Image: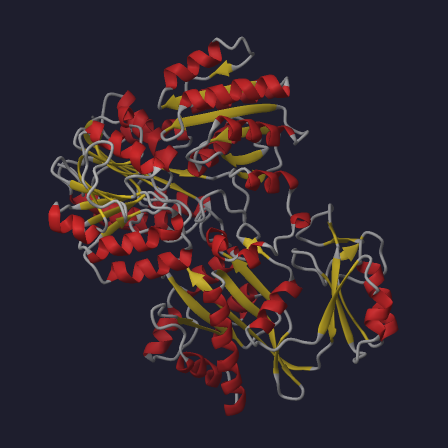
Amino acid sequence: MHVSSATTIVAQIVEISCIPNVAIHTALRYRNSMNIHEYQAQNLFEEFEIPIPRGIVLRAGDEISYSIMTLDFCKICVKAQIYSGGRGRGRFRRDFGHGGVKIVNSREEAVAVAKNMISNVLITEQTGEMGCVVNAVYVTEAIEVENEYYAAIFLDRKLRRPALMISSGGGMEIEAVAENFPEKLHRMVIDPLFGLRSYQIRDIAYRIGLPKDLSNEMVRILLSLYGLFTHKDCLLAEINPLALTKDGRFIALDGKITFDDNALFRHPEIAELRDPDEEDPREAEAVNYGLSYITLDGNIACLVNGAGLAMATMDSIKHHGGSPANFLDIGGGANGKQIARALEIILMDSRVRGILVNIFGGIVKCDVVAGGIVNAVRTTKLSLPLVVRLEGTNVEIGKQLLNESGLEITLATDLDDAARRIVALAK
Amino acid sequence: MSILVNKDTRVVVCGITGKSGTFHTKQCLAYGTKIVAGITPGKGGQLSEDGIPIFNSVRESMENEGADAALIFVPPLFAAESIMECIDANLKLVVCISEGIPVHDMVEVNEKLERSNTRLIGPNCPGIITPGECKIGIMPAYIHRPGPIGIVSRSGTLSYEAVWQVTQRGSGQSTCIGIGGDLIVGTTHLDAIKMFNDDPATEAIIMVGEIGGDSEEIAADYVKTHVKKPVAAFIAGRTAPKGRRMGHAGAIVAGKIGTAESKLHALEDAGIVVAETPTAIADALFSVYEK
């Protein structure tokens, strides 16, 4: 699909693989790479001199009435701070007839709405019926909006470069704009050696019909956004909507920033923003031990070395009629202690009816894994069926250790055999 | 014959005195790989545990020993620098094992790569092996056997799975490449398939992929129009939930891109035989290729 019908070179750049990249961009909305709350994103925008509405963050135990009654504006927007999208259309468990985003016309109403939201459970399309506890609300000045835009800088995986995307259809999901109004979506590839340049932004600003002064302001804001994107190692830095106010100013009303997990070591200030309340407890625990764990909805747990093999193990369980309870990659250099922790994390999930261990030792040695399993089974007094498939470095010693342990462990000949056995045993 | 590496390939190891550098240098030497130098800044002039001369920089090692390829075990904070150093030293091949390199660093590496004659494999990969001749990586050696099958895989341990099955069925591998699971990697499925297609010693090809991105689809498109050798494939992650990143930074399904369905469709459309389960990868290949 073509973004622009113009035939200039710029337009050709803009056209490159538009849809795949919008889709990739969608991927970055999810929470695997580190996400932060809306108010934290707004704080970062402010740090990089991107204009945001005046506002305060309130938590349970704060002086909610006093804080709101002393604000010097009375058209107020109250927003529940949870990671999930679709907050406005969500509903609260203790229902007060409004969603997670509410605009009111007086401070008194704002106090009531904030009190309704704090410590309540917000249920959205993305959270499911479990919902998500609201620990904080973001109370801002409600802005009179003339027009809404979308602006984002993200890593384009296919081009291996950052890209800029601006749309005159702000407010709505960018995927919907791409599908329904492709002519409103403008993309530009950024040369990482030279960075985003003013002329690139200006070109788009005039295309979407901005007058000179607003075009200059958009250039300023997007150069700032690019600064944020590069300085903080973002995969995505998005302003949506970038509102044009009735009095002719641009202001970032909401934002989404996704960080590269691999770069958090050089941004301790970002790593600190991680909100453990928003994360699955088993997933958070796994991170502490250098394990990669994701909760799934089945009842057969798996413990594997390597991400690809872990996915293939899940596929094999499904192929034989079972359903995986998790994805778990113990990584390249797992030791006995990590394997013991991995088993304990698996056992934190009460739905689990059987465990499949699949190890193809390369760096990880089978005897180390086997020793770790034997110890963990003894200390946890494991009573669930356990099937182990070992192959690779020191496989014979590993198998011998399991056989001589006297524990009830089923040794499988290959992955297919292992999956078939654990599915049968877990029934 | 083989692709990229053979018995004459001379290798320099970056990070040779670290824990993994030391261990895997031993393993590669035991396999017969010609490791001619090691790099650890500050330890220039010393010898490694295995008697390999250590230099302070890649340039210095090139002046003294020369090399065709580099093997990198440098921690993620310094790994991008190490790759760039190897590019500037004009090494033909750089294999980067290091896991966890920030993607913005890899964006810069990619710019430098595109202006060079260097091929990068990885990062976050098991490396490359031409069985019986040269191992530049961390894969267990004994599962390999010289033979006519080229194997390319994003996942390390899943490539061992494919290799082992081929070996157990009495065949062997021309060369195996683990391209790595990161968002930006130096060598793609397509690059590897092109090389296998041009290599007279490779008679058939196995491509192991996983959900996320469209590297497998692009390779399938090339196979459809250019490759007459039998090709078999397996895609991991058919049952992975959407929107969650499954371990590898690259393994995430986004909208319609990167789904197992999209990949399976592209593979089948290209006439590639697809294994239903990870245990059936070699069987799938031998259903269309006679050893």
Q: Quadrant of residue A86?
A: bottom right
Q: Residue at x 31, y 38 (%)?
A: B21
Compared with A243, A375 (above or below) is above
Q: Residue furthest bottom?
A: A212
Q: Residue at x 47, y 30 (%)?
A: A304
Left/right of residue B31 with respect to residue A70 in the rendered view: left
* Observer able to see residue B49: yes
* Observer able to see residue B196: no
Compared with A197, A96 (above or below) is above
x and y percent of residue A132 in the render? Answer: 72, 50
Q: Residue at x 83, y 65 (%)?
A: A64
Q: Quadrant of residue B160?
A: top left
Left/right of residue A419 with respect to residue A242 in the rendered view: left
Quarter containing the C terminus of chain A: top right
Compared with A214, A96 (above or below) is above
Left/right of residue A105 with respect to residue B88 in the rendered view: right
Q: Nearer the viewer, residue A139 or B238?
A: A139
Q: Nearer the viewer, residue B243 or A230?
A: A230
Quarter containing the N terminus of chain A: bottom left
x and y percent of residue A420 in the render? Answer: 50, 21
